């Protein structure tokens, strides 16, 4: 299993131009995340976590260095190929509200499958129920986001990121707005997903209490990796 | 407070600019109303006086008084008459135009000092006219001198040419009155010093024209007064008349009431009441008052929907603003600000915006008023006829009103929102329920009310036109029911719109891509938020369509009616003289004028003789009663080439009627009332007499509803002010047949003009041929008058401006809604982009949403507009029926009008969408995503 790397980052540097100079957000980051790993990207705010996530998620390009996803270099991919990659092979979970407010829980989850072009709808329905089951919300399928708590919404978002069968789930501070019990529960779900579905999860957090669950920890400080 | 306010406003500058725009437009529209009205009425007043001046050849605004006194001791009456004009100008508070004072001794006989062989008894009036010398030119001889007397004590006189001829006077001749003596007893002698005529620049000075002064010897007024008035008056019988003409060109609508009151005072209470004649201008002013009443009511009612929409717009924007500022408000509240403080903050903000709006709106309103005055048709202007506009007290009252309404619209929502605290806000976010109007079935109620209005006005159609003609103000329900219908239908559409979207969604359920899916869901779940803007759009478009149709229909009907009633381009009837027997008594036979001269009329394309006797009579087939009928005699072929009746008004083609008539020598076409009221049928013989009581018969070969120039129904006002309408009858026979039966009969010449020639050319020809007219119809002049009717023009103006203003607001409102909606969803768009949705798909999604809200509303607006036009235009146009409306009203829609309307809508909507796309293109995905973190 260890030989199949889902993420391979080599010397990632990201420099932002700022008024009167430059700001180095990331400086030569190397990382390898094998398939089925629950990896945590750790660091204080401003340490460069989100920048790295954005680069791995193909939303941003590094100034220097290369990222390989499932062995393919992102560099040189055009916007369409990247979108295709994001739609089919990745799932995203964001810190704050990311559900589409006009869709209920079921439709929100189903939406990622529509995006990935999965048909027919019967198959989709089954999968949506399965995913909502996994996050423990099968009884709230018809609820609108506004009718659910933050934790519930986040669990729906996780189910959504999972439904279309991605290889990699990127979760940016998914527990930041949750209480510790709920944060632990969400982390547990991620972990379970790596076990049951063989999905790789990269989650950023600064909550030290969650580190125990991780298979791997990548720790950043001032744009540099400080462990490994 | 002021600082906070400005800061707050700067923060939401776009919102505030929109509010300001709304206020400016509201103010401008509101103030344009009194400005336009005043200017239009002023113009109408002057036009009406001008019309009178032209058609009567006399000055309309004059007050005339005349007194006769016999041997009055002290001569107080004449003295009083000398002060008459000044008193009138002062009482009416008007400017003198010209004063015509005519003094005379009662007619007396005189004899020439030279014993002439042709001398006959001469009865003349020794008279004087003030300022005669300044308004006349001498034809021969000299003007009376400063002293007014010859050296040997005769009074110097000038006479008009008619007097000279009729009385066979000679210049330089002396006369002595047989029984008149100066006060000192010497015989009264006069000396004819000259012959005068009106000078070319005397204008309307000659209240009594010189040719009518054929028995007046006019002496120096100073001399006249010295010799015959004052203490000398006791020896003479005198007449004095004074005509005070005042200038109407600088009168405005505000002067009318004052003049009417003052005139009433003059006639009933003043010291001159016994000598005064009722002035003619009172009837002009009465007519003016009726028209003003009608125009005011019409314009007001037409403007109400526009004003209501403007106020709704403000309400909408300010609610949107409070919606945006909800969080801020709740934070301020939670920090302990009182509700009153918040309301005050918004009140000041509102005051700032509305007053600024008022300051900008006022001159804009004047501009709109000018534009209104130059409207020719819906969305069509003619700047050659711009109005002179000015601000009046009324303008400022309206301005204050507009500011107040704007202020209320902006501030009222703050009262509701000021009670929001964070806790309540969180609770309300989850709430989604049916709108109050949906629960109350307001749409159904409004539709019901408007259809009731439709039904009842349709049933009482006739009463309505009569009420209008009598100058009564109209039942506002008439105008309002169309607006209610539009509102009701618009709401009803909003009620069913989600189901339509759901239906479309269900039809292609499995096929929709992710973008379409989200847009469907967004609309189904959040569509309610858009209801106000959608309703606004629907109402703007359907009102626009309806108003375009109203304007076009009213204009076109007026044009068609004028065309029809004129008959053809030009109709000329010369004065026909009758032959007299050797005793000078008319024999009843006419001398036929030369017809061949019409060949010399270059402007004429064709011309034909038409007998048109409006004083003929016909016997009813049902009783022995006689009915007045218009008897026409035509040459069918020639007549047919230059006249036309629109096919829609007749049962078969107009030419078929003429052809039917052509083949029957004694055939007659009769108006349909012959069948319905007089009991005739086709094939019957009908007998009729002309106004000379000459008799003939004809065989009815057909009933015709409309015939060029013929009005089937006579409408008018009874002396008591109520309206009446009765049938007119028409019988059309062959010209040759009538001549055969009646002998020489006066005819009119109907003339069709060549292209490129106008009535000027005809006038010239009439002048050149010295033709005396007894009837003259000029279609072009009638058409001009029709088109510049203030009611027609004002209506078109208000409707056009209303549409332009609301469509601008609509676009602004639409844009605001969508900018807000996109800003609100920026995060979600970011999420969608992150999860791999293309930019194109996001556009696709938004375009779908535009289709569901924008395009659907536009289509609904067009549909509702069409239905409203079909239902209500026929009713509304009755309100514009004039008493000479002959043709049945027809609904006109001109494709070009609609294209213009669609063009404006498309331009506005595409601009809005372009702005949205520009905003969206600038949106950065990663930026959106990072919003959550730092």
Image (cartoon, helix red, strand yellow):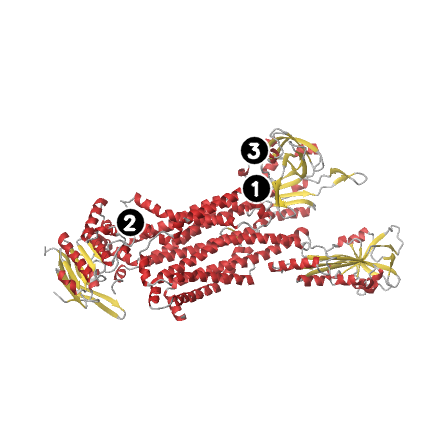
Q: Camera-side residue: B159 or B22?
A: B22
Within-10-Å neighbours for mark 1: few <14, some 14–19, many 20+: many
Residues at marks 3 and 1, CA–CA distance in whole angstroms: 20 Å
Which residue is more in the foreground, B411 or B914? B411
Q: Which mark is residue B517?
A: 2
Mark 1 vs mark 2: which is more N-terminal? Answer: 2
Where is residue B334, by image quadrant?
Answer: bottom left
Mark 3 or mark 1, which is nearer to you? 1
Chain of the residue where label 1 is placed in the rendered structure:
B
Mark in the foreground, 3 or 2: 2
- Residue denoted by label 3: B656
Q: Quadrant of residue B724?
A: top right
Residue B202 numbered tag:
none
Corner quadrant of residue B739: top right
Give x and y (percent) for residue B847. Answer: 33, 51
| Callout 2 secondary element | helix
Residue designated by label 1 = B887
Say if B697 sits above or below A19 in the image: above
């Amino acid at each position: 299993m260890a030989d199949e790397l889902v993420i391979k980052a080599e010397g990632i540097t990201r420099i932002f131009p700022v008024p009167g100079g430059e700001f180095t957000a990331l400086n030569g980051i190397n990382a390898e995340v094998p398939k089925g790993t629950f990896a945590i990207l750790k660091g204080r705010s401003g340490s460069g976590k989100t920048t790295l996530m954005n680069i791995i998620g193909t939303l941003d390009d590094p100034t220097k260095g290369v990222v390989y996803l499932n062995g393919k270099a992102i560099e040189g991919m055009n916007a369409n190929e990247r979108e295709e990659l994001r739609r089919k092979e990745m799932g995203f979970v964001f810190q704050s509200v990311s559900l589409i407010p006009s869709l209920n829980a079921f439709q929100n989850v189903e939406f990622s499958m529509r995006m990935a072009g999965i048909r027919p709808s019967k198959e989709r329905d089954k999968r949506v129920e399965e995913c909502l089951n996994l996050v423990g919300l099968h009884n709230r399928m018809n609820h609108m986001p506004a009718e659910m708590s933050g934790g519930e919404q986040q669990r729906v978002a996780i189910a959504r990121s999972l439904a279309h069968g991605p290889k990699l789930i990127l979760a940016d501070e998914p527990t930041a707005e949750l209480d510790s019990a709920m944060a632990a529960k969400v982390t547990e779900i991620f972990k379970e997903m790596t076990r049951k579905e063989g999905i790789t999860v990269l989650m950023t957090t600064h909550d030290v209490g969650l580190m125990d669950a991780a298979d791997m920890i990548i720790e950043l400080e001032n744009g540099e990796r400080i462990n490994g | 407070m002021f600082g906070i306010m400005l800061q707050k406003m700067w923060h939401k500058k776009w919102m505030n600019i929109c509010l300001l725009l709304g206020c400016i437009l509201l103010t401008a529209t509101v103030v344009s109303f009194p400005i336009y009205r005043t200017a239009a009425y002023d113009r109408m007043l002057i036009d009406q006086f001008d019309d009178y001046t032209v058609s009567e050849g006399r000055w309309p605004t004059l007050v005339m008084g005349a007194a006769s006194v016999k041997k009055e001791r002290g001569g107080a009456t004449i003295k009083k008459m000398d002060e008459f004009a000044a008193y009138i100008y002062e009482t009416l508070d008007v400017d003198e135009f010209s004063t015509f004072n005519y003094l005379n001794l009662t007619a007396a006989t005189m004899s020439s000092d030279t014993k002439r062989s042709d001398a006959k008894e001469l009865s003349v009036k020794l008279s004087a006219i003030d300022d005669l010398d300044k308004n006349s030119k001498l034809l021969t001889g000299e003007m009376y001198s400063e002293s007014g007397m010859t050296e040997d004590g005769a009074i110097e006189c000038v006479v008009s040419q008619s007097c000279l001829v009729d009385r066979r006077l000679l210049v330089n001749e002396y006369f002595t009155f047989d029984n008149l003596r100066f006060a000192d007893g010497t015989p009264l002698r006069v000396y004819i010093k000259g012959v005068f005529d009106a000078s070319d620049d005397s204008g309307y000075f000659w209240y009594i024209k010189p040719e009518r002064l054929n028995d007046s010897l006019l002496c120096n007024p100073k001399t006249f007064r010295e010799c015959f008035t004052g203490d000398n008056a006791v020896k003479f019988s005198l007449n004095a008349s004074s005509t005070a003409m005042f200038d109407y060109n600088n009168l405005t609508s505000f002067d009318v009431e004052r003049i009417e009151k003052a005139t009433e005072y003059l006639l009933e209470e003043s010291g001159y009441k016994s000598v005064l004649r009722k002035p003619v201008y009172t009837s002009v002013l009465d007519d003016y008052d009726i028209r003003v009443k009608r125009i005011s009511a019409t314009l007001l009612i037409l403007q109400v929907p526009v004003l209501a929409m403007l106020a709704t717009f403000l309400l909408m924007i300010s609610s949107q603003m409070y919606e945006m500022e909800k969080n801020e408000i709740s934070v301020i509240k939670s920090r302990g600000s009182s509700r009153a403080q918040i309301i005050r903050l918004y009140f000041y903000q509102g005051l700032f915006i509305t007053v600024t709006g008022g300051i900008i709106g006022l001159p804009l309103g004047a501009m709109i008023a000018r534009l209104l005055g130059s409207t020719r048709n819906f969305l069509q202007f003619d700047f050659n006829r711009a109005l002179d506009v000015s601000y009046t007290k009324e303008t400022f009252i309206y301005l204050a009103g507009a500011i107040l309404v704007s202020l209320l619209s902006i501030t009222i929502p703050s009262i509701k929102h000021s009670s929001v605290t964070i806790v309540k806000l969180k609770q309300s976010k989850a709430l989604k329920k049916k709108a109050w109007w949906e629960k109350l079935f307001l749409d159904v109620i409004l539709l019901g009310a408007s259809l009731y209005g439709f039904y009842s006005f349709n049933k009482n159609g006739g009463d309505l036109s009569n009420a209008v003609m009598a100058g009564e103000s109209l039942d506002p329900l008439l105008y309002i029911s169309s607006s209610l219908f539009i509102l009701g239908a618009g709401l009803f559409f909003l009620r069913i719109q989600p189901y339509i979207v759901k239906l479309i969604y269900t039809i292609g359920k499995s096929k929709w891509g992710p973008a379409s899916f989200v847009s469907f869901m967004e609309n189904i779940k959040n569509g309610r938020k858009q209801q106000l803007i959608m309703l606004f759009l629907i109402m703007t478009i359907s009102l626009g369509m309806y108003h375009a149709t109203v304007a076009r229909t009213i204009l076109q009907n007026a044009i068609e009616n004028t065309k029809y009633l004129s008959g053809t381009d030009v109709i000329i009837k010369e004065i026909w003289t009758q032959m007299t027997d050797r005793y000078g008594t008319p024999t009843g036979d006419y001398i036929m004028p030369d017809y061949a001269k019409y060949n010399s009329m270059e402007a004429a394309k064709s011309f034909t003789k038409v007998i048109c006797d409006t004083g003929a009579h016909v016997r009813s087939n049902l009783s022995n009663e006689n009915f007045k009928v218009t008897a026409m005699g035509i040459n069918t072929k020639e007549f047919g080439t230059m006249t036309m009746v629109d096919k829609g008004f007749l049962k078969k083609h107009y030419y078929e009627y003429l052809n039917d008539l052509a083949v029957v020598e004694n055939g007659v076409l009769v108006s349909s009332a012959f069948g319905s009221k007089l009991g005739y049928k086709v094939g019957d013989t009908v007998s009729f007499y002309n106004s000379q009581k000459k008799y003939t018969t004809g065989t009815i070969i057909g009933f015709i509803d409309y015939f060029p120039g013929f009005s089937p129904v006579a409408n008018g006002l009874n002396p008591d002010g109520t309206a009446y309408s009765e049938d007119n009858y028409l019988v059309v026979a062959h010209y040759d047949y009538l001549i055969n039966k009646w002998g020489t009969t006066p005819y009119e010449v109907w003339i069709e003009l060549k292209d490129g020639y106008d009535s000027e050319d005809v006038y010239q020809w009439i002048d050149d041929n010295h033709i005396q007219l007894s009837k003259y119809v000029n279609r072009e002049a009638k058409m001009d008058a029709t088109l510049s009717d203030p009611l027609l023009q004002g209506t078109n103006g208000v409707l056009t401006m209303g549409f332009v203003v609301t469509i601008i607001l609509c676009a602004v409102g639409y844009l605001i809604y969508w900018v807000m909606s996109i800003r609100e969803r920026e995060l979600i768009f970011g999420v969608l982009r992150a999860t791999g949705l293309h930019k194109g798909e996001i556009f696709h999604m938004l375009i779908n949403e535009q289709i569901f809200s924008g395009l659907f509303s536009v289509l609904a607006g067009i549909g509702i507009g069409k239905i409203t036009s079909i239902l209500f235009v026929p009713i509304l146009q009755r309100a514009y029926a004039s008493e000479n409306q002959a043709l049945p009203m027809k609904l006109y829609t001109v494709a070009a009008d609609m294209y213009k309307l669609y063009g404006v809508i498309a331009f506005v909507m595409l601009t809005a969408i372009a702005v949205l796309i520009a905003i969206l293109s600038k949106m950065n995905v990663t930026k959106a995503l990072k919003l959550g973190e730092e």
